[in-house]
Image (tube, rainbow, N blue to C red):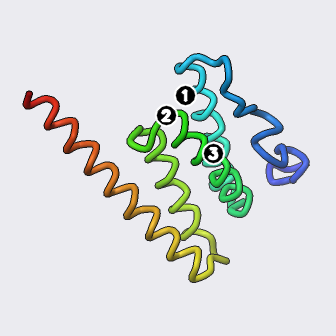
Amino acid sequence: MTLLDRKSVPQTCFEMYTLDVKGLTAKNIRKTLGAANNYAVSLHGLHRFEEAKSLSRKLIPVARRVLGENDDHTLKMRCRYAITLYKDDDATLGDLREAVTTLEDAERISHRARTLASDNHAD
């Protein structure tokens, strides 16, 4: 069995991690989402782009809901997802458009969060 053998890696992240966040502390939620995102990054590194995209599409809404739109982890997940979209050799024009939109949104949100943080420091 090789490292790239499909049987050596679970089909989905949800075989390894449960994203049911009820009862978890904020620290544990962040760790669980981080571990699941690391798995998506590993899938990307193995050029298993479809699985990485599918997992990211499940993780990002959870991160947005639980951690918030402005959270660094949420923004990093969105950027990693965009990179996965455009790095795939089989990316469609729609995938490339989604990657650009995702990066533009993440940049806008990040800029807004930095502006709010600097305004709060000025007070």
Residue at far bottom of view: 93
Mark linked to residue 17: none
Q: Position of residue 39 (x, y in %)?
A: 67, 42
Circle 1: element type:
helix
Dot 1 amino acid type: Arg
> Residue 63, located in which quarter of the rendered image?
top right
Marks 2 and 3: in contact by CB < 8 Å? no
Taking the spot 57% from the left edge, 34% from the top edge, the residue there is 34
Determine whether 52 is above or below 89 in the image.
above
Q: Earlier in the sequence, mark 3 or mark 2?
A: 3
Residue 49 image point, x, y percent: 68, 62
What residue is shown with label 3? 59
Cα–Cα gap, marks 1 and 2: 8 Å
Identify the element where label 2 is drawn.
Answer: loop
> In which quadrant will I find the C terminus?
top left
The residue shown at (31%, 57%) is 108
Mark 3 and mark 2: Cα distance apart in space: 11 Å
Asked if the residues shown at circle 1 and circle 2 are in contact, with their CB atoms under 8 angstroms apart, the answer is: yes
Q: Secondary structure at mark 3?
A: helix
Locate residue 6 relative to residue 50 in the image: left or right.
Answer: right
- What kind of residue is marked 2? Leu
Q: Is 84 placed above or below 10 here? A: below
Which residue in the structure is indicated by mark 2?
67
Which one is nearer the viewer's eye here, 23 or 71?
Answer: 23
Q: Amino acid at mark 3?
A: Leu
* Residue that badge 1 annotates: 30
Which numbered disc flags the more N-terminal residue, 1 or 2?
Answer: 1
Q: Residues within 10 Å of mark 1 (few under 14, many from 20)?
A: some
Q: Position of residue 116 (x, y in %)?
A: 21, 40
Q: Quadrant of residue 38?
A: top right
In the picture as drawn, the residue positioned furthest to the left comes out as 122
